[in-house]
Amino acid sequence: MAVRGSLLSDTWSALVDLVLPAECAGCAAAAGHGGGLCADCVAALAAARPARVRPQPEPPGLPRCVALAAYAGSLRAAILAYKERGRHGLAGPLGDRLADVVAAAVVPGPVLLVPVPATATASRDRYGDHMLRLARRAARALTRRGWQAGVACPLRARPRPDSAELSSVDRLRAAEAAFVLVPGRLAAVTAAVRGGVRLVVVDDVVTTGATLAAVAARLRAAALDVQVAAVLAATQRRVSAR
């Protein structure tokens, strides 16, 4: 029932974005199309080019990280509207651009996208796991381009404090205990990796890199190699491109 409710909520939110004259999620102007974005914000999203980013300091074990753009402007506003204000129709344009980041991060071939899991509380408050929704959209976009792409969820998130209130050191400590493996899901993922499928961890925003490093560490503990992470945005204060 919870999954069905989440799907119904996503469908309703997408229809609202398409039918009602809602404000653009990126700039608050009148939105005409683009899953809740005005033409200018759609163009800005399309113009962004993925690039490698690195937190300073870089946490141990962080996979090579590629981001679409800086966490600023219309992209930041769209992510917040999607994640915090129920604008689920934005999963379309954001998920499609996440697919572009994955395509820029790895050479074409079979991939499994591993979304950073949300806590049960966050999923309940947001009517579903926002990154799982984006990962599924990105996988479908990659499949349409001829990739073999799917989504795997071998991790579960434990309750944890709001990272916005933590220092970089505290974020790292909290992240180390934030995720656990789901044994019943490991066999299929392990078999896929042994068959040549690459794992790509996906998230919305990278700040200190602690979360991505912790997810990679948990997967490596199960002999699942993770070399790449793909994100929509990188916080400028903490991350710089090289």
Image: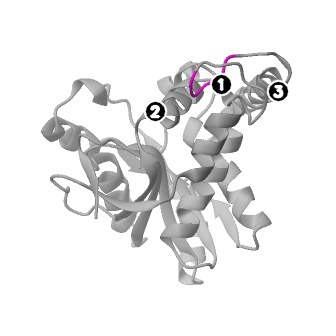
Nearest-to-viewer mark from 2 and 1: 2
Please state which amino acid type lies under the numbered disc 1.
Arg
Q: Residues within 10 Å of mark 3 (few under 14, many from 20)?
A: some
Position of residue 29 relative to residue 135, above or below, is above
Label 2: which residue? Answer: 73
Do the numbered discs 3 and 1 sit on residues whose CB atoms are within 8 Å? no
Whole-angstrom CA distance, mark 3 to mark 1, is 11 Å
Does 34 lie within the magenta span? no
Whole-angstrom CA distance, mark 3 to mark 2, is 22 Å
Label 1: which residue? Answer: 87
Does 26 lie within the magenta span? yes
Residue 220 image point, x, y percent: 35, 67
Q: How crowded is mark 2: few (under 14 residues within 10 Å), some or many (20 or more)?
A: few
Please state which amino acid type lies under the numbered disc 2.
Gly
Place residue 94 in its image quadrant. top right
Label 3: which residue? Answer: 18
Q: Which residue is drawn at 25% across and 45% down?
A: 208
Q: Which residue is drawn at 35% across and 58% down?
A: 218
Q: Is mark 2 on a helix, strand or loop?
A: helix
Q: What element carries label 1?
A: loop
Magenta highlight: main SS:
loop
**Region in magenta:** 23-27
Please state which amino acid type lies under the numbered disc 3.
Leu
